[in-house]
Image (spheres, helix red, strand yellow):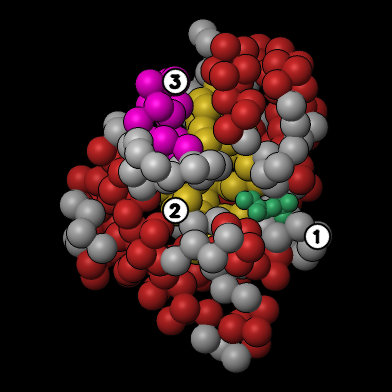
Amino acid sequence: MRTPIIAGNWKLNMNPEQTTEFVEAVKAKLPDPSKVESLICAPAVDLDALRKAAEGSNLHIGAENCYFEDEGAFTGETSPKVLNEMGIDYVIIGHSERRGYFHETDEDINKKAKAIFANNMTPIICCGESLETREANKQEEWVVAQIKAALEGLTAEQVSSLVIAYEPIWAIGTGKTASSDQAEEMCKTIRETIKDLYNEETAENVRIQYGGSVKPANVKELMSKPDIDGGLVGGASLDPESFLALVNYQD
Ligand code: 13P
């Protein structure tokens, strides 16, 4: 059985003080981690505060990106080795904002996935099509190609443990959520792709999130779908009450 995982992606929001306040407000009210895993992925500059505030609670902590080398002359990058030393559990990679604004390629994302595993953390690999691609009805081949490239060379065991986030670009920050059927259809396609690439057991184990204007009002409907195992949430994860409503969607 896959444990649902609801994750906040704070993007370029919050400072260390706000991070501490947020965690203080939510930490006693998080669900039992065997029922729903709660995760906040924060900017690198907030991770130390996040880890300290979350200590001893049910909150998992994640970074929003890292580099694929542990150290060296790579000005401005974040080391996966140091993220692990800090106690970080998850790292988001391949977000459409990083692919779009920072020109991250499928090859970079694949290298980052390997570096994250090498440093004993779990990648959350994002994929998703643009509006143009969906209007051309090419969304499935687009996302399948992204998944194949991201997973290249990973073992079945690694893929079983990772998280994939399907985030159609047209639904991010637009208030326009994919319908639960559209989200389910793509999450199912991703699971079938993993079955073809690996095996049934791996496909049954991998957790697939939907992201794109997830909010307390639509989380339950999305989570009722068989292939949607969680949400990756931007805007609605910034407010403690809203985040609590999301992670406690089963209540
Ligand atoms: P919103 O929830 O703000 O649409 O953002 C989604 C997202 O990009 C999460 O990674």
Q: Secondary structure at mark 1?
A: loop
> Going by the picture, which residue comes out furthest to the bottom?
136
Residue on which the image places disc 2: 125
Residue 243 percent across, percent down from the top left: 71, 33
Query: What quarter of the picture does the C terminus occupy?
Result: top right
Quadrant hosting residue 240: top right
For this rendering, which residue is in front, 98 or 173?
A: 98
Point out which mark residue 175 bears: 1
Q: Give the crowd class for mark 2: few <14, some 14-19, many >=20 residues within 10 Å.
A: many
Q: Give the crowd class for mark 3: few <14, some 14-19, many >=20 residues within 10 Å.
A: few
Residue on which the image places disc 3: 86
Q: Report if the beta carbon of the residue with label 1 is closer than 8 angstroms to ligand 1.
A: yes
Whether 32 is drawn above or below 192: the answer is above
Q: Give the crowd class for mark 1: few <14, some 14-19, many >=20 residues within 10 Å.
A: few
Does the rendering let one see residue 179? no
Residue 51 percent across, percent down from the top left: 55, 18
Q: Earlier in the sequence, mark 3 or mark 1?
A: 3
Residue located at (53% from left, 42% from top): 76
Circle nearer the viewer, 3 or 1 = 3
Task: Judge whether residue 231 is colored magenta.
Answer: no
For this rendering, which residue is in front, 238 or 72?
A: 72
Quadrant hosting residue 148: bottom left
Q: Which residues are magenta?
A: 78-91
Circle nearer the viewer, 2 or 3 = 3
Q: Report if the beta carbon of the residue with label 3 is closer than 8 angstroms to ligand 1.
A: no
Q: Left or right of 222: which side holds 203?
A: left
Task: Judge whether residue 83 is colored magenta.
Answer: yes
Q: Secondary structure at mark 3?
A: helix
> Going by the picture, which residue comes out furthest to the top?
56
Q: Secondary structure at mark 2?
A: strand
Residue 15 percent across, percent down from the top left: 74, 27
Q: Earlier in the sequence, mark 1 or mark 2?
A: 2
